[in-house]
Structure formats: C-alpha cells, structure tokens
Amino acid sequence: MQPPKLAFASMRRRWLLVAASLAVSAALAEGALRTLDRFPPPPVSPIPRLPELYRPDPDLGYTLWPSKHLTYHYPASSPRVISLISNADGFRNSREFDEPDSRQRIWMLGDSFVFGDGVDAADRLTEVIERHEPQWRVDNLGMTGWGLDLMVRAFERMSRRVKPNLVVVAFYTDDFRRLGPYYAGQGYPLPKFELVDGQLHDRPFPSLPPWRQLRIVQAFEQIRSRRGYNRYDLNEALLNRLHKNHLGVPIAVVFLPGHGDTEEDRTRRGFLNDWCRKVSVPYFDLSDVIHRVGVEAAFIPNNFHWNEHGHEVAGTAIHAFLRDSGALRTGR
C-alpha cells in the first residue's frame, strides 16, 4: 500500500494526464473543424448588408431610411433597377400610415415577400388586393428578413398612432427559424423575445464571448438548436400576443409557401392551421394556389421571391379569402 502522499501525487498525475489528453483532443477537434469550415460561429457583431438602404432601429432592428426615394438592383447581378419609396416610418410606402382616410384599413405584416423584393411597389400583393377592393386601404408593413417577433413589434409601435380594422400576418415558411438568438436579418442587432415560464420577455441581442466562438462549442450549440429551430413555442406565444392586442384589432393569418412543399413546410403550415382553428382566427394557406401556377410562372428566375405574376395570383387569392371569410367583420 502506497503512503498517502505518494497515492495523492499519483492520482494528481493521472488527473493532469487526463486533462492534458482532453485539451489536446479538443485542440485537434477545433483544428479539424476550422480546416473543414464546419460550424462557423456567428459574427461577434452583426454586419449590415445594405446600409445604403436600411438604417438601424432600436425597437424594430432596422427599417428603410425614412422619407427617401432609393433604388437597388434585384437580384444584385440583375441590370433591372427597383425603386424604393419609403414613408416617414421607414416602410416601403409612398403614403403615411396615419394620414386621414375613411376606408377600412388593412395592415399586412410580413417579410420580403410582402415587402415585394424584386418587383415594383405597384405590382405587390397589397396593391393587388386594394385594386380588387378600392374601399379597402391596404397598407404594407413588410420588411426584408423579418420574423414574427419584429412583425409584432411593428404592429405595437404603429398602432400607438392609428388603429387598423384588420391585421393580416403573412407567414412565409422560412419565418419560423428567424426567432433564433443570433439571427440578425439585414445584419443589425435585433431586439429579441425570450419565453420564460410561458411569458414573453424583452432581451437585447446577445453578445458572443470568446469561448462561444470556438467551433467545438458551436458544434454542440448548432446541433442542439437544429432540433427546435422552428421555435413553435415562441411563435405561438407571439401569435397569442398579437391576437390578444389591447386594441382588440382582429387578425387573419396567411401562409406563404416556397418553391416546393417539403415535410417541414407541411409541419409549419399545419401548426398555423391548428393554432388558427383553436383560437378562431381566419386562416388561408396559399400553397395550392402558388404551386398550381408553378415555379417558373410565379417566381423570379433562379430566385425564391415572386415575380409580378406571382404577386398578382397571391393578391387575388388573398382578396377573395378576406372578402369571403368575413375577416373584417370579426371582433371580440
């Protein structure tokens, strides 16, 4: 039997050897992941993608530069120049949200599909709806790269000044994943929501300490996040918040599909259908309408956004849905 001091020294050497082996293994794994460029960390600070078009906003993350007439190429390699006219709130509108208007007001919340990336403002689905129903005023509150969190924040800010008769949430299939902690849209530090014990809490955009920049740490975090990156729990809490808004403004939900209809797409639109049925909110799934037209006819070539025909088809179908569902007469 070894004396206590020798036994302790032997144990200490074994633990140091184990620690050194783990450190070497971790360093080798980190080097391999860097060589293979696997599990890259998010930027330490988000990098704005198009600062000539977008400006930071503390409440909404970013908007267009307000009250401007700007232009851009879309797609970036295309010779076509798209005009962007913004109102005082930084949305793609030539009119102000709170200007006098006796018509029923519909607000459409959404991302770049509602914004109309790649088409002129006159060809967007919101303008199509208004042409079908001139007694409705259809305001476009879409913004490229937004998820439901920023759509809710936009409604809550704008509704302090003017009350719409109906809010339509246009939910593109990719919007579900945009509630992730490091998702930054157009490259700005977005304000975040966190769900704690069933309650929504405001959180600033998270910092990225050095240890979280390691590839081996990112491998663990990214693999774990993929299992729940659609954040159905947080999306449901945000839908509930919008549905129960203090002004009592009714809402309707529209699902906007991508090129195809994957199993994940079906799960996402099934979630929206179930939620809307549970709380008696009008719901419309555009999948069949868009897929019936076809990718070549409805989408910009080699792009995931709709062309003018896609917007015409979508706007016409949404108009019929709003008219026939009685969504504007829904109240509490």
Image (cartoon, grey):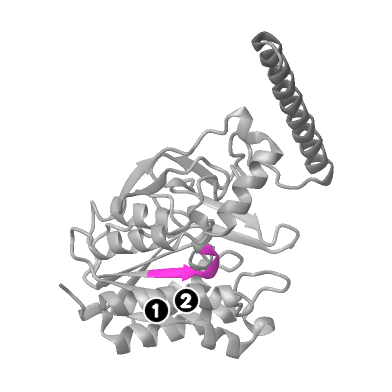
70 magenta-colored: no
Mark 2 and mark 1: span between their CA atoms? 6 Å
Residue at 62% x, 50% y: name it: 222
Q: Can you see residue 299? A: yes
Tag shown at residue 269: 2
Q: What type is the residue that disc 1 sits on?
A: Asn
- Classify residue 306 as left or right of residue 75: left
- Callout 2 crowding tier (Cα within 10 Å): few <14, some 14–19, many ≥20: many
Residue beneath disc 1: 273
Q: Is residue 131 visible to the viewer in this orientation of the structure?
A: no
The structure residue drawn at horizontal position 68% and vertical position 35%, both measured from the top left corner, is 214
CA neighbours of label 1 inside 10 A, class few (<14), some (14 to 19), many (20+): some
Percent across and percent down for residue 224 are: 58, 52
**Residue extending furthest toward the front:** 1
Q: Is residue 26 above or below residue 290?
A: above
Q: In which quarter of the image is residue 317?
A: bottom left
Residue at disc 1, secondary structure: helix
> In the displayed structure, does residue 79 sit left or right of residue 59?
right
Q: Give the range drawn in magenta.
A: 169-175
Mark 2–mark 1 CB contact (< 8 Å):
yes
Looking at the rendered structure, which numbered label has been put on residue 210? none
Q: Against 73, is 268 above or below?
A: below
Q: State the image coordinates of residue 235 (x, y, percent, origin top left).
A: 40, 61
Q: Which amino acid, mark 2? A: Arg
